[in-house]
Image (cartoon, grey):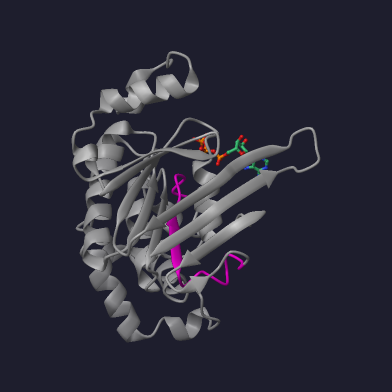
Amino acid sequence: MISVKDIKVVFGRGTPLQKQALNGVSLTIEQGSFVTVIGSNGAGKSTLLGVLAGDVIPSEGQVLIGKHEVTRKSTAARAGLVARVFQDPLTGSCGALSIEENLALAARRGEKRGLVSALGSKRRDYFKERIAELNLGLENRLKDRMDLLSGGQRQAVSLVMATLAGSEVLLLDEHTAALDPGMAEFVMNLTQKTVAERKLTTMMVTHSMRQALDYGHRTIMLHGGEIVLDVAGDNRKNLQVEDLIAMFRKMRGQTLDDDALLIG
Ligand SMILES: Nc1ncnc2c1ncn2[C@@H]1O[C@H](COP(=O)(O)OP(=O)(O)OP(=O)(O)O)[C@@H](O)[C@H]1O
């Protein structure tokens, strides 16, 4: 379960560049619920994920993950509670380490022990099994450096990594945006399966209105650091991509340059 109460974030306070990125965001997400997050550039989407991950400490408000009050806890201190997959496949894993070393590090998130004890033969077998489930043939390449993988392969491995420490919250920050359409679909199907099997409480930021409505149980739209739309159930089922685009237009007070970007 995630609960954020009246979160405010101000960047560059007292400077000419001062920016209120979140302006009183409150949200409760039940355990196992999958929420898609949309909003135009600068709406506050990544800041909200940052507040949950611990990269951004809010100036006001409270963040609960499960029973844990984590508002002022560092990223490292909440590493065992929250896993995150980024847009850039190079972020979130270490290119110079092998696939299995990355998996070992991910399994130890939130713990203090080192890599050596993390790679016993039982662990190796388990990692091999988990990677084989991807059906990408990567189980035979566990000793390959992570940076030899394609972007899509790397995102698939990142999703496996996100599940290894037993975190109950999964944050996805446009994690398919840099992939070709085929690989994006593969990673989205894997995401859906992972979230459902492990009952992960999930927030996925996307610029694709199609994805926002096709995946998950609930959709929120941010604008100017506030939640301006929060739909689930039948209200969401009845929403079309065109409806969301119309809302974007209304919020921005202008015509979108390229609707195709949002529909894709
Ligand atoms: N570290 C920072 N320092 C200063 N300003 C920041 C910082 N991070 C974000 N901002 C500003 O806060 C606002 C919200 O940014 P955020 O990245 O959360 O938006 P977003 O909805 O994720 O946008 P995008 O879709 O472009 O990724 C923007 O105006 C941004 O420029």
User: Which x, y percent locates residue 201?
Assistant: 34, 61
Asked whether, in this view, residue 205 is left or right of residue 7, the answer is: left
Please identify the quarter of the rendering in which residue 245 is found. Answer: top left
In the picture provided, is 108 more to the left or to the right than 220?
right
Question: Residue 125, relative to residue 13: is it above or below?
Answer: below
Does residue 194 lie above or below 181 as drawn?
below
Q: Is residue 16 visible?
A: yes
Position of residue 211 in the picture relative to residue 51 (left or right): left
Picture quadrant where residue 209 is located: top left
Indicate whether 101 appears above or below 148.
below
Q: Residue at x 18, y 41 (%)?
A: 234
- Across and down, in percent, residue 13 comes to 76, 43
Q: Is residue 80 magenta?
A: yes
Q: Is residue 225 magenta?
A: no
199 and 14: which is toward the camera:
14
Quadrant containing ligand 1 reads top right
Query: Which residue sits at x=21%, y=45%?
Result: 233
